[in-house]
Amino acid sequence: MPELNLNFASDNTGPVARPVMEAMVAANSGGAMPYGNDPWMPQVTDRLRALFDWPEAEVVLVTVGTAANALALAGIVHPWQSILCHPIAHIDEDECGAPEFYTAGAKLVHVAGDNGRIDPKALARKIAGTGGSVHNVQKGALSLTNVTEAGTLYSLEELAALTTLARDAGIATHLDGARFANACAALGCSAADMVRGFDMVSFGGTKNGCMGVEAVVMRDPAHARELHLRRKRAGHLWSKHRFLSAQMLAYLTDDLWLTNACAANAAGQRLAAGLRDIGAVMAWEPQANMIFCRLPRAAHDRAQKEAQYYVMDDTDAPLCRLVCDFTKTDAEVDRLLELLAG
Amino acid sequence: MPELNLNFASDNTGPVARPVMEAMVAANSGGAMPYGNDPWMPQVTDRLRALFDWPEAEVVLVTVGTAANALALAGIVHPWQSILCHPIAHIDEDECGAPEFYTAGAKLVHVAGDNGRIDPKALARKIAGTGGSVHNVQKGALSLTNVTEAGTLYSLEELAALTTLARDAGIATHLDGARFANACAALGCSAADMVRGFDMVSFGGTKNGCMGVEAVVMRDPAHARELHLRRKRAGHLWSKHRFLSAQMLAYLTDDLWLTNACAANAAGQRLAAGLRDIGAVMAWEPQANMIFCRLPRAAHDRAQKEAQYYVMDDTDAPLCRLVCDFTKTDAEVDRLLELLAG
Amino acid sequence: MPELNLNFASDNTGPVARPVMEAMVAANSGGAMPYGNDPWMPQVTDRLRALFDWPEAEVVLVTVGTAANALALAGIVHPWQSILCHPIAHIDEDECGAPEFYTAGAKLVHVAGDNGRIDPKALARKIAGTGGSVHNVQKGALSLTNVTEAGTLYSLEELAALTTLARDAGIATHLDGARFANACAALGCSAADMVRGFDMVSFGGTKNGCMGVEAVVMRDPAHARELHLRRKRAGHLWSKHRFLSAQMLAYLTDDLWLTNACAANAAGQRLAAGLRDIGAVMAWEPQANMIFCRLPRAAHDRAQKEAQYYVMDDTDAPLCRLVCDFTKTDAEVDRLLELLAG
Amino acid sequence: MPELNLNFASDNTGPVARPVMEAMVAANSGGAMPYGNDPWMPQVTDRLRALFDWPEAEVVLVTVGTAANALALAGIVHPWQSILCHPIAHIDEDECGAPEFYTAGAKLVHVAGDNGRIDPKALARKIAGTGGSVHNVQKGALSLTNVTEAGTLYSLEELAALTTLARDAGIATHLDGARFANACAALGCSAADMVRGFDMVSFGGTKNGCMGVEAVVMRDPAHARELHLRRKRAGHLWSKHRFLSAQMLAYLTDDLWLTNACAANAAGQRLAAGLRDIGAVMAWEPQANMIFCRLPRAAHDRAQKEAQYYVMDDTDAPLCRLVCDFTKTDAEVDRLLELLAG
């Protein structure tokens, strides 16, 4: 019987999916031209164009989500422009200023909303209130995240409402898709549905079964050359690029991206239900594979001895983040619940 | 009989060494904490500290040599300072301005010298001539590359002469070690000998058997925290970091780094000898695994049909770059020579 | 009888004070060494050191307040750090991202509070909540403005409370002193009292009688050289620098800075009282020379025909900003009130 | 009899021309809207458009030549592009990296040539040799200076040859016109002739009779908005802007710019002739108001007691730079020569 993996700290603590690792091993044969000139990359581009229904999209691969987001944003905002985002957005909270670095100093501006989602009314007000004088930071981009950093979802209608507001105001749109697949799986929508209102997408692979690969997908190829130059200049152009292409190609083959996400979400939902049963109070409705909840102190103290997850504060009912990666089994979820139940 | 790999374009067209790939596969089991908190990383740090005889050094891993160089340089120069380098340095010629990006605009300043090596006299003159007024870019860093971009070597004495000049002038020193192992192998020196005069080293793995891993090694840990913050901010902190640690650990185990480099250099020397026999004219003395030479046109035309290498100009005797990676066999080298000989 | 100047748009619409202009004309005789090597600059430094009771302070002059703030901030924060400021701070709202530009991408983070003043409790919470992990933007600086952008004042006690919180947390402190003199005049305190808790001060001259000169004053000279290099690199080092020195010296002579501020504040208070009489509703308590209030629509419509001031919204009772510069006479204030009264 | 001004260190050690100072004093009356909304600025724009025969040009004023150059260059190059310039160009040697700062890291690349002038053949070779791969810094801009930093001139034909080469290669063109007027005066050409091949011009006023004003003139207004935003963001938008407009307007009135330059050049030529007579050896042919020559040691030692000029080395025949500003009288020039002659 395999050892139970009770690491619920993040989906990035999980392993690489077997088909991805096998593809990497298979790619490791003889020589291949470097820097994206390997034979697999054109297939990656074709697959993502088809998946998004963006026939002319430009695709570049990097290995870290922070880099994907920062590159994508640098491609759509000037240094004197703003990037509108939710106050708990990963780009604002968890990237140590990478967007500011890559954009040469654009300003991240908060637009609030409940449950980790930007409120369209707040967005409309923010857009209306953004001064156009030379003294003000100018309107630039809107960045949304689905699954949100709260573990909740934007519906397709909500995405459409927000991106339409932005586009009508001449604001470019970016989707942080670190958990793109989990959002598709939870909404039951296609990737093309998800990206409809966007200009730039960070399509994540790392959290969902890859080793380290994220696609930056740019709908309109007019500025594709700049995207490549920015990637190189940021030190993100791999020489042995075949190992990025191979990962992404395996991830896109036989719907592995979706299958893994369904598994992660199912585990997340099983865990959420069990947590409620043992008295956890959800901070936000967990709609995919990430749960924020307050655990009874005693339960938490018991579980911490064997399981890993993030604790956001140290109170009688500590706020905890638990995430299920795509490998989480019922046995692992149940064992954690058992520990918590005592 | 395995197919011959006639790709001599670069050492980065080669595959991943078996021990490295096996270590990556082995690391892919269950969960591991992300961002360098995996169990392998402390061993990597210990090994590199011992190898360099830098007991307090800070080590961070990234996946691309350009990133390693740019991060290392950003750690030792201010934006208003210069980085002295050879006119054909990789940081100046082949990184699309990554050092300028990471340093927020430091200036790369050429110091000439024959055979891809900075001339100590030229360095002394440049240092003496650098103005100290507020109008001038200030003295900052010296960056050397060994193996040089010309395929030649600095001897330990030459390194010492240059780094001493720099240090006496208050100039920090960086070694671009994309082919660090090849230089050690060719000089028959230890890694500690190689790094003696430096403050920062980019210790390359990718070109010599890894998939994508380079260590930035900082001798003095006083500013270690900044190095970590810069890496994160640049989007180079891997979440599934165990796969970087595992690569580097395998590379440092049983002297794999040195073994591979010896193999690559031996192939390079065999190739160089053969090229001379068929009338190639060396642009510089090939001292490791990289050869720049002018090939007879007819020989070149024949070889290009089956083999890959870079052509720098299109003349009757085209200037070509041929590089042997660590997997190059005698049979592969000989087949290329056979093609050229016609 | 001189024409009445009914421009209340800003204190920067006002003229240059006579002693300042005379000093500039007087300085325009023969040659003077450039770049701060004129004979007046050492006196400026001496005066400001004495005024602030900062005996070792470094002083550099620039001509624009935005530049003074951005240079000052760049001298105390790293790119990966935050600058804590009030949501309506000039550095965040009105400088088109200059702090981000000069700091190479530091992040301005809001700390709220009523009446344009940061609430010490909010500051304490923000400091406590700032993560120390490598994923987070790090703690860097606190920037306060006195007179605030709401036209209100921090008392000396409030300044001390905030700067002490910051310093205890290792956070550097900056005072945006665009209206430094007005704050001193209104509080009846010395300049030394005002700067006690700060590391860097932007000491404004332009709004209060100079043509264009602001002093960046750095308490601790350890990094003075960098300040000079940053100024040069930003294109703010004047060649004919004598005309900046002469302005600032005249401004510091015979307490001109304080005299002008007293005049501006007195006019502002006269105007505020009169506005209340005609039914204006103050947005915040006007404590110096700047007033934000809602004017009755009819009054506003009448006044706009002859007078200038900024209108922030277009409602039945529009929110207006009226500022008195140091030249505003009783007759001018009364004429505006007369227009408004109808 | 007025005291003789024997400061020959630079044209920026000179005073402000009387008409310019009078215009500034005259502008100092009552209120004026800030930030370029003063009544004089539209006239400045009209005059420069007419002078350059660029009917749609955008004009922004700043106070420092370094800022003018850096803003102009930032308007025409991306961070990943190069700026081709002569090895002794002011932008490379004397601006402490301001172009790198403003452009977010573009690379200044040397193109050599005798006498401070870029050789068209060298430019053609450099353009041909600039790689187009993603690894290379891309072609961006060519920056020329007339009067050159060597005190020599480009003829109109030479300018045309260089700018045509650039434009044919898709390279934008910038003229550093710190001594624009001196070049026009020396060549006997119109301003329109001078700017014919350029996209961006830094039109200097400070060295030639203004206090501190330089115009950035952008031929094609398509990106005019960005120029204004960059100026603001760099802290170079004056609030009391009327004093910049007034300076520039006076400078453009009654050909003051040209009259002053003729005076400076005449003094320079008188000085050059006299220097030759006393045995000075010209480093380059002095074609305007700036002279680089080797002075006999004894002559130099005598002169240094009373006169100021820059000494570039300390040899038996020190290399000296002597510059005549527009106020230099025959008596002053002759007195210097007398001192040197002994």
Image: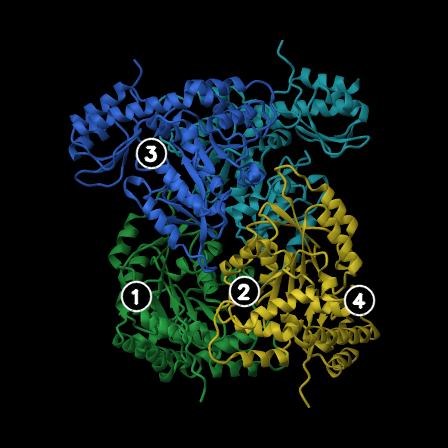
Chain colours: A green, B yellow, C blue, D cyan
Q: Which residue is mark 2?
A: A236
Amino acid type at mark 2: His
Q: Do discs 4 and 1 belong to a common subunit?
A: no
Which of discs 2 and 3 lies nearer the camera? The answer is 3
Secondary structure of residue under mark 1: loop
Camera-side residue of A9 and B286 = A9
Alpha carbon separation for disc pair 4 and 1: 73 Å
Q: Which residue is mark 1?
A: A317
Q: Residue furthest top?
A: D1
Which circle marks residue B282 in the picture? 4
Which of discs 3 and 4 lies nearer the camera? The answer is 3
Alpha carbon separation for disc pair 1 and 3: 40 Å
Please state, as top left, top right, bottom left or bottom right, where the C terminus of chain C lies in the image: top left
Which of discs 4 and 1 lies nearer the camera? The answer is 1
Q: Is residue B278 left or right of residue C31?
A: right
Q: Mark 1 near mark 3, Cβ–Cβ under 8 Å? A: no
Could you tell me if residue C205 is visible in this image?
no
